[in-house]
Amino acid sequence: MENLQIQSSGITAIIGPSGSGKTTLLSILAGFLRPTIAQSGEMSFGGQPIRPGQAHPPRIAFVFQSHLLLGSGSALLNALQGRLALDGALDAEDFQRIAEAAIKLGLVGQDPPLTAKRSRQLSGGEAQRTAILRALVSNPDVILCDEPTSSLDERNAQMAMEALRVWSVETGRPVVWVTHNIEQAAAYAAHYVFVSNGSIHKPPQAELEALEREPDPEKLSRLREIAATLRSTTDDPDMSGMATGQEQIPRINGFGRLNFARWIAKALSADGPFGNMFSDEAVLPSPLYELYDRLEPAARRRPNWLLRVWTAILSYSRYVLAMVLTVLLFQILSASFLGVVAGAYSEQALQNPSVARIVFENISTNLDGSLNGPRLYPGSITAEDDSVLATSDLADAVRSRIADDVPDADLERVAVYGRRGLAEQQSSMQIVNAGRDAPAACLEPSALRAVVFDDQDPILIETRLRGDLAGWPADMTSALSMDLPLEPLGGSLARLFLSDGTVRRILERCDIPEAALPRVRWSLGQQAPPLEGVIVGSVQDFPPLYPLSADLIVLESDYQIAAQLANIAPDSLRVANTYFPIEGFESAETVIAGFGYEPRDDSREAIATLKRIEGISQALPIIVNTINLFGCAIVIFLVLDAVFELNKRVLALFIAHGFRFRDMFAMALFHLIPAFGLAIAFNSIVAYLGWIMVSPLLPGTLGTDPSLRDRALIEALLLLISVSALMIVFASLTRWRKVQQELKEHLQE
């Protein structure tokens, strides 16, 4: 084209037959196509040159043959599209401009009001006038129209063209209008561009001047004569140079952009089967009600909040999506909870001081009967030769070896505690507080097998006591720390733990007062002086006692006192427990064997089992969550892609009117938020109610730690939100690239 100038005000009609190149010219003016500009050529807007590849500076509004309205949104929401996308919040001047344009287009003052109606409830003429209102109120620098009145009756067409003409006159801005209607062109256009066979056709200057004179009774006949000479072209325009959305749209930020994306998302979500049950009107966002009230002062006021909530619930169209997300999130939450609990249990068990241990024995395989290893004694002693070893010295040796082999190990966990086994002839117990009517057997000493533990030995805590006896401690920790209710008659008061079967027989036969702890005398054999004591625990399960078995647990400190009373020198320890950090297993085993002691029992298999549980607790949730998150991603993509596909041309017009990728992302995000909110709310309730039922069943102290529930819930939510955000970005980006072609294809059609 050569020397084409579009006037800066008034309506310029582009006239030509189908296929002559009108759409190509309109696409170039809109910035959809980059023209090839010769070295000496120039393209400018308002006197400002536009260099090749540069985005068009003007703000452009569009009106097409079809209205391209969002069907589920109100007419008012659609009309504000370009205005809010470009400039944000509305001021008083905007209200005035909108009201005047709506009045000229006959969109206000109707009964029932049109501006609050869903766009799909509007007639063809009402919808097209709404599309023209959308262009007028966006305050553009230029309006491009492609056959905007071709589907309107004469009255609506006159109303639409008159509104465009008045806007152009009042603002001094141009309207570029592609039309086949010569009569309308003669009536409303002030300037003319003729397209023929892919080129600009220039009639003689005298004819152009005559056409632009007002009034001219011969204008219609002159236009018909010129139009009769125009020809179409069979060549399709080259659209490969279509500009991207980023080049079309100026970088304008505003509060209105985010709000408008949210309103569009709400309209897309308010398309359920019951949405039109009570009214054809849409529930407007609060800011639009103020504008609606000004435009339709005689119309009904906004509904109360209860009706708005009820209408929103009925019209919501994504309940199926919410149900699917609820199920997927529940499965993710369940897997995360099991993983968290299993991991916490494994970690708690592995950190238990009694887990990593070796039980060893000092045996004799020598002909002279001497022990293989040094005689081992509890505590700290001063040894005269290598034949004697204190448990503290053995612990130091293990600690030193682990420090060399595993520098980062927790050496505070290294300890050695001995245990003693007492045969029946070495342990005697007599009940002191039996009733007067108790049989003689209750008053006589009984021989019992006993095992002696250091009260600091972690394995002692593994003793499980009967917890349903009134006045009796329910666990070993309580039993070891309780204040004894009895005062000793002589000697020291010992804490003793008796097997549950023996305790039952004593309580049933010996007439001991209810809730009273049995008072006893215990000695190292029936002939030895007794030690006053109290049975403070009924043992249901003894700790691992290899190679021993017992009916009674005695503490090492009490054993030492009883030995002094009996004037007996305590023998060396034949069996002991060594504790250490898990990673120091081999080091501890080497030290023990080096002293000549024989390992008899260790927790290697238990540790391996716990580590397997820990590994499974980490791997299984990952597998389950990956499957569910993949399903979630597919569902989100399909839902968004369907929404974008159903509204692709409307979205294309959004982009043309100033929408950017982030606006499309925000719209997609807001569209999914209600479904996510329902799924999250349901699963949060399930998590808190489920914790009440599940926590009593959890092992150890896990049931008293609600942070496990919170960790699982937060982990599940973070996984769902992260994957969903990625899919929203992916779906929006995929459709963003496609939707930019939709407007071009619509122009071609």
Image: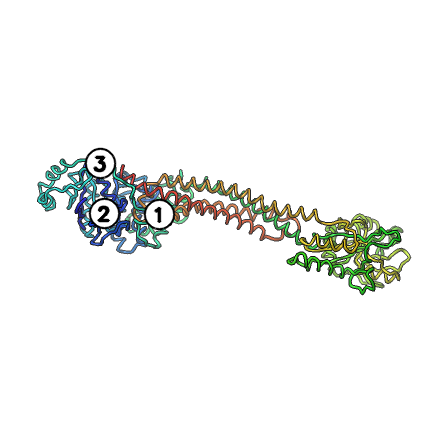
| Horizontal side of residue 189 vs 374, given as left or right | left
**Residue 401: which numbered mark, if any?**
none
Residue under label 2:
37
Amino acid type indicated by mark 2 = Ile
Residue under label 1:
284
Residue at 67% in and 46% down = 609
Residue under label 3:
19
Residue at 56% in and 45% down = 621
Mark 1 residue crowding within 10 angstroms, few (<14) / some (14–19) / many (20+): many
Q: Is residue 624 above or below residue 363?
A: above
| Horizontal side of residue 359 vs 423, given as left or right | left
| Horizontal side of residue 474 vs 742, given as left or right | right
Q: For the residues marked 3 and 2, what is the alpha-carbon distance in whole angstroms?
A: 23 Å
Residue 45: % across, % down: 22, 51
Quadrant of res 429? bottom right
Q: What kind of colouring is applied to the model shown?
A: rainbow
Q: Is residue 20 above or below residue 718?
A: above
Residue 100: % across, % down: 23, 50
Residue 272: % across, % down: 40, 40
Are the residues at dot 3 and dot 2 in contact (C-beta closer than 8 Å)?
Answer: no
